[in-house]
Amino acid sequence: MSNRETYPKFLEKELQNHFGQGRIEVFNCGVSGMTSKKHIARLPDYLYFQPDLVIFYEGINDIVYEVFPYAFTHSPQILRRLFISSHFARREARYLLPYSQKELRESLNLVIFTALDYLNDTFLQQGIDLCISSIGVPYRDKLTKEERDYYDYYYDKEWGWANSTFQQYCDIMKMYNQRLREYCKENSLLYIPVEEHIPAGTKYFGDVCHLRREGIELKARVMAESLIPYLEQILDKPEEKAISTP
């Protein structure tokens, strides 16, 4: 996908249509495979752009590649051995993995929100505003049977392995988005409700997390609608404003 087809580019267009050309510039800092901890390593790159505002839209890679494996390693050893050694068990009985909500919340805090605290503190010290967006999710209970079968298959193929299912992904993403809302309230940060405005289904989602063009454009519009009132309060000088979107 070229940068012209990414949500930062569509967001820049939406904001420039409202504020006029030359006043808003949106930098696309997204990189495939990034996690919250990796964003910390790239902080010098982000600060080099001297942004006025940073949008945080992150967490999927953390959850799939760190949170679920962490929870899996803390599940009963006999179950871990069974799931690792048996393809049938992985395929047919992963829903039996006893992940508690408490355990998953602790893992989310350890993996993501500790890093988010560091990012927030750093941006605050630099006088940079941080906004946090919820993550769009094609929730399984809102899909047709054909769509559920498609996403179940795709999740197993690309992400699930032995430690999670598409349903478990949906459950933890709902928990994560709720925690993001709480985090914004606790830290007086602007919350952008992307999750709440992108319908589930293959019209908008190519797989369990990547959006089709219709979804990308809708995501940009939702972000713009949240950002415009916020920016109108701080955009009181004629110079260009820069926004980064890790």
Image: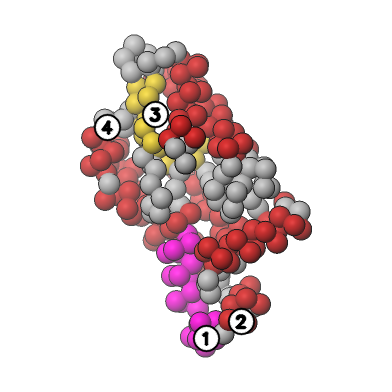
Residue 67 on the magenta span: yes
What residue appears at the point 68 percent right and 47 percent down from the top-left corner? 201
Q: Position of residue 72 (x, y in %)?
A: 48, 74
Dot 1 crowding, Cα within 10 Å, few <14, some 14–19, many 20+: few
**Which mark identifies residue 89?**
2
> What span is colored magenta in the figure?
63-84
Q: Looking at the image, is mark 1 or mark 4 earlier in the sequence?
A: 4
Residue with the mark numbered 3: 26
Query: Does residue 96 appear to the left or right of 21 in the view shown?
Result: right
Q: Position of residue 92 (x, y in %)?
A: 66, 77
For disc 1, the marked residue is: 85
Q: Residue at x 76, y 54 (%)?
A: 144
Observer-side mark, 1 or 4, equals: 1
Distance CA(mark 4)–CA(mark 3): 10 Å
SS class, disc 4 = loop
Q: Position of residue 46 (x, y in %)?
A: 28, 38
Q: Residues within 10 Å of mark 3 (few under 14, many from 20)?
A: many
Residue at x-position 38% and y-position 52%: 34
Counting residues from the start of the chain, the first of labels 3 and 1 encountered is 3
Name which residue type carries label 3: Val
Q: Amino acid at mark 1?
A: Ser
Q: Residue furthest bottom?
A: 78
Instruction: Name the residue nearer the viewer: 24 or 77.
Output: 24
Instruction: Report the Cα–Cα distance between label 3 and label 1.
Output: 47 Å
Q: How many marks?
A: 4
Q: In the figure, residue 26 lies in which quadrant?
A: top left
Q: Is residue 238 magenta?
A: no
Q: Secondary structure at mark 2?
A: helix
